[in-house]
Amino acid sequence: MKVLCLAEWGLKAIPLRTDSWLVFAVVLIALVIFIWLIARLVARVTGDTDPAETDRRMLTAISDLHRKGDLSQEEYRSIKSQLVERLQDSGPTVQTESSDVAADSQTEQTQDS
Protein backbone atom coordinates (compact mmCIF):
# COMPACT_ATOMS: atom_id res chain seq x y z
CA MET A 1 0.00 0.00 0.00
CA LYS A 2 1.43 3.29 -1.07
CA VAL A 3 1.13 6.32 1.22
CA LEU A 4 0.80 9.61 -0.60
CA CYS A 5 2.51 12.71 0.66
CA LEU A 6 1.15 16.20 0.35
CA ALA A 7 4.14 17.06 -1.82
CA GLU A 8 3.12 14.44 -4.35
CA TRP A 9 -0.22 16.17 -4.76
CA GLY A 10 1.40 19.54 -5.06
CA LEU A 11 0.16 20.73 -1.69
CA LYS A 12 2.14 22.26 1.10
CA ALA A 13 1.35 21.86 4.78
CA ILE A 14 0.90 25.01 6.77
CA PRO A 15 3.83 25.21 9.11
CA LEU A 16 2.64 25.54 12.69
CA ARG A 17 4.90 26.39 15.49
CA THR A 18 4.98 23.85 18.28
CA ASP A 19 3.99 26.39 20.89
CA SER A 20 0.79 27.29 18.97
CA TRP A 21 -0.54 23.79 19.75
CA LEU A 22 0.31 24.34 23.37
CA VAL A 23 -1.64 27.61 23.38
CA PHE A 24 -4.58 25.85 21.70
CA ALA A 25 -4.54 23.09 24.34
CA VAL A 26 -4.42 25.57 27.21
CA VAL A 27 -7.27 27.63 25.77
CA LEU A 28 -9.34 24.49 25.19
CA ILE A 29 -8.81 23.30 28.77
CA ALA A 30 -9.65 26.76 30.12
CA LEU A 31 -12.84 26.82 28.05
CA VAL A 32 -13.93 23.42 29.33
CA ILE A 33 -13.30 24.49 32.94
CA PHE A 34 -15.20 27.76 32.36
CA ILE A 35 -18.23 25.93 30.94
CA TRP A 36 -18.16 23.46 33.84
CA LEU A 37 -18.05 26.32 36.37
CA ILE A 38 -21.02 28.03 34.73
CA ALA A 39 -23.01 24.78 34.80
CA ARG A 40 -22.23 24.31 38.51
CA LEU A 41 -23.19 27.90 39.28
CA VAL A 42 -26.52 27.56 37.46
CA ALA A 43 -27.25 24.31 39.31
CA ARG A 44 -26.47 25.96 42.65
CA VAL A 45 -28.56 29.07 41.92
CA THR A 46 -31.61 27.13 40.75
CA GLY A 47 -31.27 24.82 43.72
CA ASP A 48 -32.39 21.74 41.83
CA THR A 49 -34.92 21.00 44.58
CA ASP A 50 -37.89 18.72 44.34
CA PRO A 51 -41.15 20.72 44.45
CA ALA A 52 -42.80 17.91 46.43
CA GLU A 53 -40.11 18.24 49.10
CA THR A 54 -40.86 21.96 49.35
CA ASP A 55 -44.57 21.18 49.75
CA ARG A 56 -43.78 18.68 52.52
CA ARG A 57 -41.74 21.33 54.35
CA MET A 58 -44.59 23.83 53.98
CA LEU A 59 -47.03 21.25 55.34
CA THR A 60 -44.83 20.74 58.39
CA ALA A 61 -44.56 24.50 58.87
CA ILE A 62 -48.31 25.09 58.73
CA SER A 63 -48.86 22.19 61.14
CA ASP A 64 -46.52 23.91 63.58
CA LEU A 65 -48.32 27.23 63.10
CA HIS A 66 -51.67 25.54 63.70
CA ARG A 67 -50.43 23.86 66.89
CA LYS A 68 -49.13 27.20 68.17
CA GLY A 69 -52.50 28.80 67.44
CA ASP A 70 -51.27 31.18 64.75
CA LEU A 71 -53.60 29.62 62.14
CA SER A 72 -57.31 29.03 62.57
CA GLN A 73 -58.76 25.58 61.88
CA GLU A 74 -60.34 26.85 58.65
CA GLU A 75 -57.10 28.40 57.38
CA TYR A 76 -55.17 25.28 58.30
CA ARG A 77 -57.57 22.93 56.50
CA SER A 78 -57.64 25.14 53.40
CA ILE A 79 -53.87 25.36 53.06
CA LYS A 80 -53.39 21.72 53.97
CA SER A 81 -55.91 20.47 51.42
CA GLN A 82 -54.16 22.43 48.67
CA LEU A 83 -50.74 21.07 49.65
CA VAL A 84 -51.97 17.48 49.99
CA GLU A 85 -53.62 17.74 46.57
CA ARG A 86 -50.35 18.93 45.02
CA LEU A 87 -48.44 16.15 46.79
CA GLN A 88 -50.85 13.52 45.47
CA ASP A 89 -50.54 14.92 41.94
CA SER A 90 -46.74 14.77 42.06
CA GLY A 91 -46.47 10.99 41.83
CA PRO A 92 -46.83 7.57 43.45
CA THR A 93 -43.76 7.85 45.70
CA VAL A 94 -45.28 10.84 47.45
CA GLN A 95 -48.74 9.31 47.91
CA THR A 96 -47.60 7.20 50.84
CA GLU A 97 -46.43 10.32 52.64
CA SER A 98 -49.60 12.21 51.79
CA SER A 99 -51.63 9.34 53.26
CA ASP A 100 -49.60 9.81 56.46
CA VAL A 101 -50.59 13.48 56.34
CA ALA A 102 -54.25 12.48 55.90
CA ALA A 103 -53.95 10.14 58.89
CA ASP A 104 -52.41 13.00 60.87
CA SER A 105 -55.35 15.17 59.88
CA GLN A 106 -57.84 12.58 61.14
CA THR A 107 -55.94 12.34 64.42
CA GLU A 108 -56.09 16.11 64.84
CA GLN A 109 -59.79 16.18 64.06
CA THR A 110 -60.53 13.57 66.72
CA GLN A 111 -58.40 15.51 69.21
CA ASP A 112 -60.28 18.73 68.42
CA SER A 113 -63.67 17.05 69.00
Image: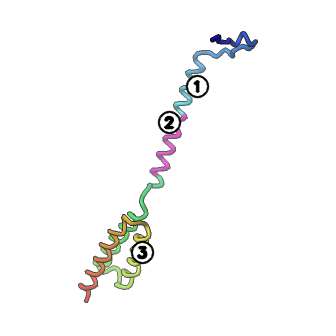
**Camera-nearest residue between 7 and 65:** 7
Q: Percent position (x, y) of residue 42?
A: 50, 49
Looking at the figure, which quarter contains the N terminus?
A: top right
Q: Is residue 110 above or below residue 8?
A: below
Is residue 39 a member of the stretch shown in magenta? Answer: yes
Quarter of the image for residue 85 reads bottom left
The residue identified by callout 1 is 24
Mark 3 or mark 2: name the one nearer the start of the chain.
Answer: 2
The amino acid beneath tag 1 is: Phe
Label drawn at residue 33: 2
Is residue 68 a member of the stretch shown in magenta? Answer: no
**Camera-nearest residue between 7 and 43:** 7
Depth-wise, is mark 1 or mark 3 nearer the camera?
3
Quarter of the image for residue 74 reads bottom left
The residue identified by callout 3 is 85
Q: How is the image coloured?
A: rainbow
Which residue lies at the image location 47% right of the left edge and 45% below the top edge?
40
Looking at the figure, which quarter contains the C terminus?
A: bottom left
Whether pointer 3 and pointer 2 mark residues with C-beta atoms closer than 8 Å, the reply is: no
Mark 2 or mark 1: name the one nearer the start of the chain.
Answer: 1
Q: Percent position (x, y) of residue 21?
A: 58, 21
**Which residue, as the protein is rendered here, is positioned at the far left?**
111
Q: Element type at marker 3?
A: helix
**Which residues are the magenta region?**
31-44
